[in-house]
Each structure stands twice: as C-alpha cells, then as structure tokens.
Image (cartoon, rainbow, N blue to C red):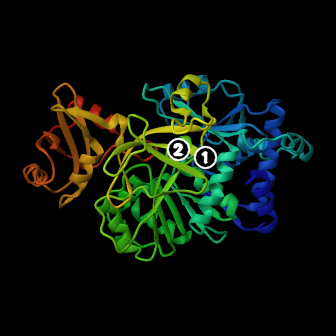
Amino acid sequence: MMILECLEKNAEKYPGKTAFSDSRGEITWDALMRDVKAAATAVISMVPEVNRPVAVLIDRNIESVIAFLATAVSRNFYVPVDLTQPEERVRSIFQQIRPSLTIAACSIPEGYAEILTGNLLEINSIRNTPAREDLIEERQKNALDTDPLYAICTSGSTGVPKSVLIPHRAVNDFIPVFCETFGLTESDVFGNQAPFDFDVSVKDIYSAIWCGASVFIIPKVCFAMPKLLMKELDQRKVTTIIWAVSALCIVAGINAFKHLRPGHLRRIMFSGEVMPVKMLKVWMNQYPDALFVNLYGPTEITCNCLYYIVDHNREYEKLPLGIPFKNEKVVFLDENNCEIRTGGTGEICVMGTCLALGYYRDIKKTDEVFVQNPLNSCWHEVMYRTGDLAVLKPDGQYYFTARKDFQIKHMGHRIELEELETHIQSLENVMRAVCILDEERNKIVCFYKGSTGQAEMVVALRKKLPKYMIPNIFVQIEDFPVTKNGKVDRRKLKEMWKEGQVTG
C-alpha cells in the first residue's frame, strides 16, 4: 500500500465520493488528492532533506489528515501533537523530536508559541500552494518502504514521552490484511473516535485510503451528549467503529441506545483495555447480527497483532486475545525465555514486519525491548517484548492478565491487579472496577461503579479468591478519570486516593 498510489487510485475511481468528513464539512477523494499534493509541495520546499520529523498540531478535523498525508508524500514523517495537553508535556515532545517543520491544523493557544521550535506553517495556507508534480516525483523515486511514516508519542514510565517510530512497510503490510480479515470495502463508513495522536486512528485513516471507504471524524462533544452521538452515527450511516473500550463503556453505561439505535452499524471493534463482559453484552443485545472483535496490540507493533471474533452464542467470563494477523508471529515467553504451556503465564512477544523502527532518538530504550528472539540462534530476528502478560487456559486460548507493572506483591503473594478486576466485574450490579495498591498502607484499593455494597462484595469475592487477593478498601465512584486516549487513568486514581479526594 503506497500512500500516494492509493490516493491517486481513489481520486480516479471515486472522485466525487466523500473521503473524510468532520463537524464542519467534508472533502472528496479528488479534492483530497489535490490538497495533499499542494501541501506536500510546500513541505518539500521548507524541508530540503528526507525522513525528517514534522510536527502536526492536531484537531479533530480534515485538515489534520491532509497535513499527515502531505508530510508522508514529501517523504518525511509526521508527529501528531495535541495542544490541549499541558504545556510541559508539549515542550517535552518538541525537545525530544526537534521537528524540522511544524504544521498547524488547529488554533494555537496563548503561551504555546515559544514552545513550537522551528518553522511554522498553517495548513489552510499551504493546501493552496501550486502543486509541483516534478518535485513530488523526485522525492518519491528513491523512497524506501523502511522510511518512517509517523511517530506517536506514548507515555513513558519515567514521565518522559516515548516517540514510537513506525515505517511505511509496517502500515503497508498490516492495513490490507486488516481490511481483508474483516471484509472492509469502499462501501464502509468509519466512525473515528480515537484521537489522531493515538494509534487506533491509524486503522481508520489508512483502511479508508486502502479501500476507498469514508471516515467521519466524530466531534469530541458527542461523547458528552449521547443523544447527539447516536444521531450522528445514524445520519452519517456509520458501518464500522474501532473504538477504545472506555468509549464503548460510556455509551453502554449511560444507556445511550434509549435515545436512538444507529441503524447501519455492522462491525464493532475495540482495544486498549480488557472489555468488561457486561458492557459488551449491552452492545451485543442491540446488535445481535454485528461482528464484534476484540483487538490486541501496542503502538510498537503498528496497532494490533492479535484478534478475537466474539461468538454471540457463548457465555464469557473474560474475552480471549485470539489469533495473530497474517504475517505476524506472536510467542508467549516465561521468565526463563521458554514458551509457556497450559496454565502458565508469559509475556507477549511479537515478530514480523509490523514492528516499529524503535523509539526516536532513544537507542538505549529501543534496545531494551526490541531484542533478538531468544528462541532463534540461527539468524538475526528482532522481537518486541510488550511487557504484557497472558495465560494459556485449557481451552487453548490466551487471555490477557496484566501489565508487568500492574503486578503487585501483597501479603507475600504476587497479584495481577487486572485479574482481580475481572473477578470483581463479574459480581452482580458491578459495572466496572479498577484496583490500585496503596504502598504506604500496603492495602489494595478497589474503585468501582455499581450499586453493590462493600460487605456484599467481600462475601461474594471470598467464594472466588484467596483472602490475600480481596481488596481491603472499596470506593464507589460515579465516573472514572480517563486519559486523552480513552483509557482509565490509573495514575490519576492513585493521586486522587493519595490526596484524599476520594475515600473508602
């Protein structure tokens, strides 16, 4: 999947068809092609070298997509930056990536100007640049599929962002397989929920480019106004959503379907966290004939490496991770680098062309997790160690258990907090649960959403778990804080507990 070739194909085959739409308007495939080439010409004139970072100041709009694609066509790589983040976070990103150019696809808040180092272009000015086909052709003729396409800044354990650098090859290989696996075609309309600096959005953007489909960029306000969200999904005839688990849980938790049931949805995919089965059932009851898919994979392996198609006729306590996508190899290793057997817990490790190039400007961190496959002593084979743990159950399926850093030691025992959460969420009238360890008091704190009382929960959990795994404190909470990517913000929960903002 060469991006420029796909854009040209879609412009020729579907010239007047909507490619992307947002709250303010839409752009057709032929207009998108013209704007991308125009903006790419401007980028080439400003960045004489290739494979240089270009920061894109994003919003939930078509202009951000134009900036991404123009950067790619100029043979540089884009770095999405969200200016709704704190200034210090933005400053840290810019200090790390040192962009050769910054493209603004949003308004710049006061106080951010001095952070934005390097040349600054406004997307709506450069999309009207006279396109130079000769410059674009010159840039493209020596392009390699190992050239970087984008870098996504993820949270680092030290608080310093890590810039995951993804090459064209990884997207070229993954997206066609993704579309083939789930039967995506030019007739589909994607409802984009994921922020553009979150890798889930890569599936929306590039699946549409590969298939000639359409993408509706859902306004952020819709997720605070369920009636409006349902109306937009229905009127835009959205067929496919690839959302964070928390976004689906918001809709299910507030019973948004009482307002309207969008009538065109036929694929509901989710990733980022373990999907609570009760929340999933709310969606499945509304869409008994739809395809539901549990997707797994970190940013470092280009979106996803495993998928599981949910069986409507099966009762689940927890969803399996499923099987690898084509051209991706997944192994599960124990602490001794041996493949795990039934009943064992191991780390998920991935190989194939899906792997990132590493972390931009951080060779040391790259070398820690992009390592030689310990099962292969015959040739160089790079493996990414995800840090995610899974267990192989007797049914032959792997189930996610926890992050390595979600492991705690309590009363002398190792405990996977997310395993504990699964048991709590299985209790009657408990919609969701998140557990943390209060290290100072050596107590497990469970935050939960539901109507069950603490005493009832303890009695029920005693039937399921050893005493050392039962939380010491239960905190009923109305809404969980979430990160900008839609995941439960565990760090914020811990801060709220430590500062006494919530009590048990």
Name the residue located 51 percent from the left edge and 74 percent from the top edge.
Answer: 264
Cβ atoms under marks 2 and 1 closer than 8 Å: yes
Name the residue located 65 percent from the left edge and 46 percent from the top edge.
Answer: 170
Question: Circle 1 sits in a helix, a strand or a loop, which is it?
Answer: loop
- For the residue pair 85 and 433, the one nearer the viewer reads as 433
For this view, does 114 lie left or right of residue 84?
Answer: right
For this view, does 378 lie left or right of residue 437?
Answer: right
Residue under label 2: 350
Q: Quadrant of the N terminus?
A: bottom right
Q: Position of residue 422 (x, y in %)?
A: 26, 52
For this view, does 63 lie left or right of residue 450?
Answer: right
Q: Which mark is residue 354?
A: 1
Kindly report which numbered mark, 2 or 1, lies closer to the viewer in this rendering.
2
Q: Position of residue 191 (x, y in %)?
A: 54, 61
Name the residue located 52 percent from the left edge and 44 percent from the top edge.
Answer: 350
For this view, does 475 lie left or right of residue 351?
Answer: left
Q: Position of residue 384 (x, y in %)?
A: 53, 38
Q: Quadrant of the C terminus?
A: top left
Q: Position of residue 140 (x, y in %)?
A: 84, 43
Amino acid residing under circle 2: Val
Q: Mark 2 to mark 1: distance in Å?
A: 9 Å
- For the residue pair 9 and 395, the one nearer the viewer reads as 395
Question: Circle 2 sits in a helix, a strand or a loop, which is it?
Answer: strand
Q: Specify whether residue 283 is in view.
A: yes
Q: Which mark is residue 17?
A: none
